[in-house]
Amino acid sequence: MSSHREAPEIAKDPVADSSDLYAFVTPDRPETVTLIANYVPLQLPSGGPNFFEFGDDVRYEIHIDNDGDGRPDVTYRFEFTTEITNPNSFLYNTGPIDALDSENWNRRQFYSLTRIVGGREQRLARKLPCPPCNVGPLSTPDYGDLVRQATFSLSTGEKVFAGQRADGFFVDLGAIFDLGTLRPFQQLHVAGKKIFKEAGEPVNATDRLNVHSLALQVPMERLRRRVDRYHWQEPASVIGVWTSASRRQVRVLGDRVAADTNAGPFTQVSRLGNPLFNEVIVPMAQKDLWNTLPPSEDKRFAQFVERPELAALLPVLYPDVFPNLDKLNRSKKARADLVAILLTGIPEGLIDGFTNSTGDVQADMLRLNTAIPPARRPNRFGVLGGDLAGFPNGRRVTDDVVTIALRAIAGLTVPLVDRKFQPDEAAGAVTPGLSAADVTAPFLRKFPFLGTPYDGFNNPSAES
């Protein structure tokens, strides 16, 4: 999956697990950038009596780099507190929740939002309420109205929402991790030869599951960084974005009298820039380390981008289908195309009218050229489909990032840096066979863009 349970340690800590990150110029407000960071993945809708929520002991942050050094110039920090209104009840709610201050709602979450620039902290909001989880038609009869109540336009220009949403990521997980099986791809005929007899239908493994989302709309002028006390840098055209979660270094478990205590400085336990980076690029033994480091340290992992393991596996899993990729692998040439896409951004001159390069520092960040306007007719294959406003230029909620990544690894993007290379015919066809249409909850056309979370009454289990 994009970054769901992608490393051994964070798989044990879902509250701090950053699962997806989106960054795009807002279609209905093109003077702003929308940033969405998802956490707490793989939520079954029927989550009671202890419904899912953000962690009060976790510091969630969305970082923006606007000078290309792989370090944050602007950070938005979310910190949460939980309040119980009736300590003698085991119930999440005792009646319909029709407002964020409903007396029927027993366990509420609030958050503060802080903007950090050059070490200076500016508290933008205090005690903003989250909406409840989508319990069911009796408990949350008008969930859309609760979301509207929990969406805030701040005096500083940002719009913000924090709460449960439907997981919008789509992937045929069961097939991909069964030795790289790609069900629809199996039925392709290459040189008159059918690869496999039966393929089956692809299944979206994350459908009818929920996440918790941090959603921000930020005016582009707020993406500047402070040069000194009196001067600001001009807004950056290309920005790098990543999200992180941090916990206190020490946790002391309490007894019957004392509560648990968290102490010491915060330490990063999760991060995410490009989708699938830690998932399929970083080797198992280094995944936990990667989660603790800033993007500025990603030169340590450049060798795995230059020679990705999956690129070597494709010719083995699909014999005689990727001869040109196999030859490229055997040449031991570094994959400069993947380095550009994932670690530095694509420089000028490789794609007409496009660049999202942030310089020479190798860092896993979701890079967005904010000067490129939203597409009138978005193509789900993004830049590979001729749509310069899509992944890997940022990431929109409907972009088919799994197919884009697979085709790039299969060699489709090599001609960007080596015009003599001829991609295999299969490289432009490889796909898990899913799209945004395979997400049951419709995406929204406006903020916060991800669909209404699945409720537990109508979705008692993911399998049903």
Image: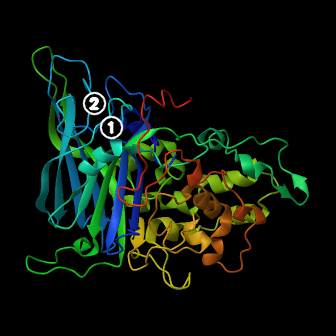
Question: Is residue 111 among the parts visible in the rendering?
Answer: yes
Q: Is residue 174 left or right of residue 82?
A: right
> Residue 392 location in percent, x, y?
50, 67
Number of marks drawn: 2
Tags 1 and 2 in contact by the CB under 8 Å rule? no
Residue where numbered disc 1 is placed: 15
Tell me where residue 235 sits by quadrant: bottom left
Tell me where residue 26 sits by quadrant: bottom left
Q: Quadrant of the C terminus?
A: top right
Question: Is residue 362 among the parts visible in the rendering?
Answer: no
Tell me where residue 94 sits by quadrant: top left
What's under tag 2, amino acid-wise?
A: Pro
> Distance between the Cα atoms at labels 1 and 2?
26 Å
Residue for point 67% across, 41% down: 179
Numbered disc 2: secondary structure: loop
Q: Is residue 337 left or right of residue 135?
A: right
Residue nearer the viewer, 356 or 160: 160
Q: Is residue 184 left or right of residue 133?
A: right
Residue at the outermost right position: 192
> Can you tell which of label 1 and label 2 is closer to the viewer?
2
Residue for point 67% across, 65% down: 411
Residue where numbered disc 2 is placed: 96
Residue nearer the viewer, 248 or 373: 373
> Residue 308 location in percent, x, y?
59, 57
Residue 453, above or below 86: below
Residue for point 21% across, 38% down: 109
Q: Earlier in the sequence, mark 1 or mark 2?
A: 1
What's under tag 1, amino acid-wise?
A: Val
